[in-house]
Amino acid sequence: MHGLLRGGDEVILSGDLIPHGSRREDTREAASRAMDLLRQDEEIWNLFTRKEEYDQSGLDGYGRFPYYRSGHRDVCTPRASQVLIENGFQCEYPEGRPFAICLTHDIDTVYKPLAIKGYEIARSLREGDFSRVGRIIPQLRSKKIPAWNFQTIAGLEETYGACSSFYFLALNKDDPEYAYAIEDLDQEIGMLQDRGCDVGLHGGCGAYCDQETLLREKRSLEKILNRKVDGYRNHYLRFRVPDTWELLERAGFLYDATLGYPDCVGFRNGMCHPFRPFNLNADREMRLLEIPLAVMDRTLLLHMRLDMKQAWDEMERLLAAAERQRGVITVLWHNEFMIGESLQFYKKILEYGRDRGAWMTGGGEIAAWWEKNGLRPP
């Protein structure tokens, strides 16, 4: 299932390492033809390029462009991908899989303070949620429980024939969002790599707009991995079009997986396929691959104020939309959400993917596959 990263002609993941018999030129030609097609409809082109975000007014407190500011309201329909597929572009996945679910985890924290656990117990008692109290009490004996759960996550996904990406912060102690030392996770990261998981950088709050900060954090993680870092997602989904893409491209990343709304699930630029962004300022297609984010746990289960049934209905709608276009739907589930109802919700996503025959893997394998194959023109 995860053989793309191993063996002979199929080893590709970073930079210029391309398999023998590569169709790189073919995929670039296909991308060019896709751009030409999208340009024919001004509304679709503006959606695909995120033209409205070049005017950087009306951002939220984290410097992000929120969905409520967008003029494109049909966020649950991947309109740009739909145009490409309806005009004959095709996509294939390993073993003839009908579509892909890109599974990802942002590691914001690995230690949960005792005070927070005590607060959660008190809140659960007030709400009469005694089962939750029962789950939290055993956690009091260790600050690593429940967030130090990487082996559990990888094991769960393996039972569904899946693997995923883990994006780790690599911050200095004086950084305001510092939560853990990346060096403390050396063994855990090695375990994930041994199990075929993709490990990427979770850029700190300032990395999305500062080249020096971005490179410092990248080097810190690369020292732990002892290899080049290929994948990226920024903390709090902070992102600036097209500036962040330019910084990531110059830093040598293969792919980014940040482009999603913090306040609404869906397809931010109308794509449910990986794509190379088009920089309107420079009038060029970029080398960096974007694997757009469609669903974040906090957005779906907290910010949108949906109950579990409503949240699943929305999730299923997005999964079905991606499947219709033979696309890739990227899901972000934080390690601290792997408990209780949110864990059961994640299992439902894995069950859906298994039952529908989806290719469930991380951003690294998706990017490697896309470099070699990508969307094929009619």
Image: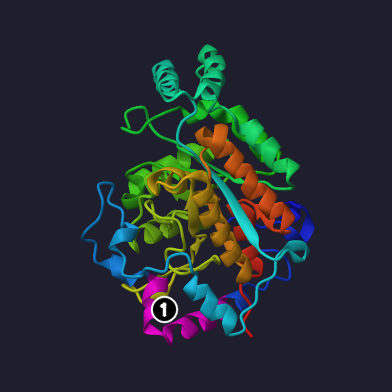
Residue at 46% over, 60% down: 266
SS at badge 1: helix
Range of magenta residues: 28-49
Say if the magenta span includes residue 43. yes
Say if the magenta span includes residue 231. no
- In the image, is 191 to the left or to the right of 269? right
Majority SS type along the magenta span: helix
Asked whether residue 19 is in view, the answer is: yes
The total number of labels drawn is 1
Residue at 51% over, 14% down: 140
Indicate the amino acid at tag 1.
Answer: Ile
| Of the pair 196 and 357, the residue shown nearer to us | 357
| Of the pair 310 and 262, the residue shown nearer to us | 310
Residue at 69% over, 38% down: 156
User: Residue 353: horizontal and vertical position, in percent?
Assistant: 68, 54
Residue at numbered disc 1: 44
**107 up-or-down from 241: above or below:** above
User: Residue 357: horizontal and vertical position, in percent?
Assistant: 73, 59
Give residue 224's quadrant in the image. top right
- In the image, is 339 to the left or to the right of 115? right
Asked whether residue 198 is in view, the answer is: no
| Quadrant location of the C terminus in the rendered image | bottom right
